[in-house]
Image (cartoon, helix red, strand yellow):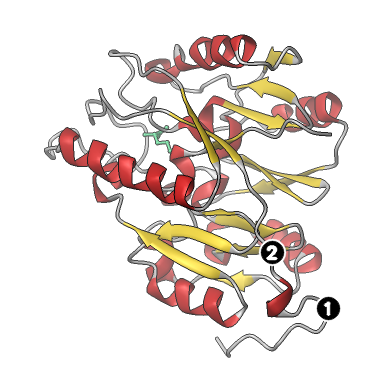
Amino acid sequence: MSPAAPDDRDPPHMRTARARHYLMCRPTYFDVVYSINPWMDPAKPVDTPLAIAQWERLREVYLSLGHTVDTIDPVPSLPDMVFAANGATVVDGRALVARFRDAERIAEGPAYHNWLRDNGFPELRTASFVNEGEGDYLLAGDWLLAGTGFRSDPRSHDEAQEYFGRPVIGLTLVDPDYYHLDTALTVLDEKTVAYYPAAFSPGSRSVLERLFPDALLATPADAEVFGLNATSDGYNVVLPQNATELAAQLRERGFNPIGVDLSELLKAGGSVKCCTLELRRDA
Ligand code: ARG
């Protein structure tokens, strides 16, 4: 790929951070004891104390950037509950709580529902169709980008559009390694995304090219280390530290990449974004 051309409409020096409100879940009971995506191998040992230390570091990075981080209590029988992004989609103060595809994670839905209900989100409901929250729903400016193909049911896209009253752009994932939208695409600011083209169907790739002609394109090497499983506040981009080429592209485009090591969580097929649910209160 040739280096990105400077973007006149959005000069790099104009990038501004906006403080975020995140919900996270400590990986106290994290383990890999079942396999619902190709990254999960229950035969591979997991170092839970290391996972906790890596997660604590991520939380500290967010706090040092001025973000608010709330936490939800982990539940002993739910080893994937650390992946808070999957718990809901919260936009304009309205929460659409997840309905998980797999039996192993179904009980996480009510846990997130109760947390949101008890923490100032009265406008909430649980999705009627399989909907894995911000794993598959990413807000980009006015639009909700919505993944399907492996987890969230395409019918959940219509439901989300009706509920949020925002245009939902359906995108089809085709590579099982990138089973959630947030493993293949990250929103950097209202107009800028980065994605891994090979993870999408040809039609969805064309949609992305049409909507985001200035997108950063990740290499296979960056995608494989979950480089796109990142969070951005508009300037600071927290991403897996091994995604070095993506970090260089981000720097070129005026963002501030901050690498973190979440190697233990990658054993379950998750990283930075998976651990982070954004709570958007204001319409
Ligand atoms: N083991 C979890 C699953 O397969 C990982 C979820 C990762 N979360 C995410 N937002 N992509 O469901």
Quick one: 200 or 248, which is closer to the camera? 248
Q: Residue at x 57, y 46 (%)?
A: 181
Whole-percent x, y for residue 198 in the image: 53, 64
Q: Amino acid at mark 1?
A: Arg
Can you identify the residue that label 1 sits on?
9
Q: Quadrant of the C terminus?
A: top right
Q: Quadrant of the N terminus?
A: bottom right
Q: Residue at x 75, y 80 (%)?
A: 11
- Measured in 3D between alpha carbons, the distance from the residue under mark 1 to the one under mark 2, in whole angstroms, is 15 Å
Q: Quadrant of residue 107?
A: top left
Q: Is residue 39 visible?
A: no
* Relative to 282, 21 lies left or right: left
Can you identify the residue that label 2 sits on?
16
Q: Secondary structure at mark 2?
A: loop
Whole-percent x, y for residue 84 in the image: 47, 31
Q: Secondary structure at mark 1?
A: loop
* Relative to 168, 58 lies left or right: left
Q: Residue at x 53, y 55 (%)?
A: 184
Q: Is residue 72 above or below residue 55?
A: above
Whole-percent x, y for residue 142 in the image: 83, 47
Quick one: 187 or 100, which is closer to the camera? 187
Q: Amino acid at mark 2?
A: Thr
Q: Residues within 10 Å of mark 2 (few under 14, many from 20)?
A: some
- Residue 257's disc is none
